[in-house]
Image (tube, rainbow, N blue to C red):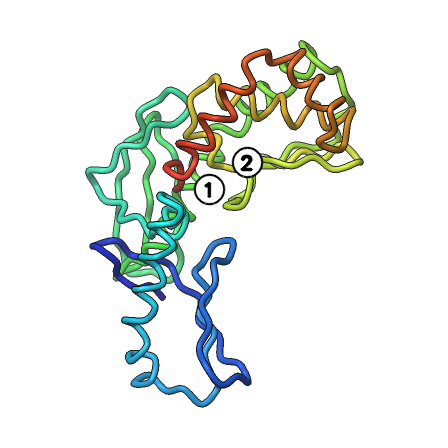
Amino acid sequence: MYISLKDKKIRLKIEKQFRLTERFSAGRKYVSVQIPSWYRKKDFLKITKKLEGWLEKIEKQHPGFLNRYIIKDYDQDSILNVMGDHIGLQLKEVNRKTISSIVDGNTLIITTPTPSDPEGIRKAVIEGLKKKYRRKIETEVFTLNEQTVKGQIKSIKLKDNFSNWGSCSNTGNINLSVRLMLLPADVREYVIIHELCHLLELNHSSKFWALVQKHCPEYKVHEKWLDKNGNMYYF
């Protein structure tokens, strides 16, 4: 479900709970709307103005924060800038129940049921691009690892992650956000180096940051760039 705010579709997750009043909160992938269990559709419609006001307040306090919840309208004219390539999108609506994606050169072909589901298309776009660029990103990670910390990598996974750009476990599992595919190459490289340094220092201590600076002297520039621009890079 979604609510329109200034011509933008904001993704919602509505939950009925044993409570007296409604509550709004910013979740990982959705704006969470918790409502009393006795609410009916007409009751929810009454609180939309209140929800819109809350969203506008959040956007004013944290410009760009709501971008993570916007449902993009991918169409035939969409051009995606991914890993230095321009990827064109081709949508095919057919009489079927499932959605699929394949890559043909620099064209991403999405076959979708009629009527199409924007969230389903978003996920299909991600899956198609993961198929095309997974190996390239894995190669970048292993190459940078050999050039820097030379840590022990157990696995590399791309995840549809909204809350961070990457993570590293104490067993050497590196998770990277699919949004890295949209970032400039030097910023993407910094994020990867950041996670590689966690292979040796699983914390954010001064020792960790000294290691990051050793292998990425301009890391503070990239950190500031992500703080300023990161909210603009979502599928």
Task: Name the quadrant of the N terminus.
Answer: bottom left
Q: Residue at x 44, y 70 (%)?
A: 33
Q: Position of residue 102 (x, y in %)?
A: 39, 38
Q: Disc 1 residue type?
A: Glu
Mark 2 and mark 1 residues within 8 Å of each other at the beta carbon = no
According to the picture, the residue beneath numbered tag 1 turns out to be 127
* Up/down of 101 relative to 19, above or below: above
Left or right, residue 93 beside residue 136: left
Q: Front-most of 34 and 102?
A: 34
Task: Give the secondary structure at mark 2.
Answer: loop
* Up/down of 70 relative to 13, above or below: above
Task: Give the secondary structure at mark 1.
Answer: helix
Q: Quadrant of residue 83?
A: top left
Q: Position of residue 127 (x, y in %)?
A: 46, 42
* Up/down of 222 relative to 17, above or below: above
Q: Disc 2 residue type?
A: Trp
* Up/down of 155 relative to 22, above or below: above
According to the picture, the residue beneath numbered tag 2 turns out to be 165
Q: Residue at x 57, y 26 (%)?
A: 191
Q: Quadrant of residue 147?
A: top right
Q: Which label sits on residue 176? A: none
Q: Residue at x 33, y 26 (%)?
A: 106
Q: Front-most of 21 and 40?
A: 21
Label 2 CA crowd tier, 10 Å (few <14, some 14–19, many 20+): many
Q: How many marks?
A: 2
Task: Name the quadrant of the C terminus.
Answer: top left
Mark 2 vs mark 1: which is more N-terminal?
1
Q: Front-most of 129 and 141?
A: 141
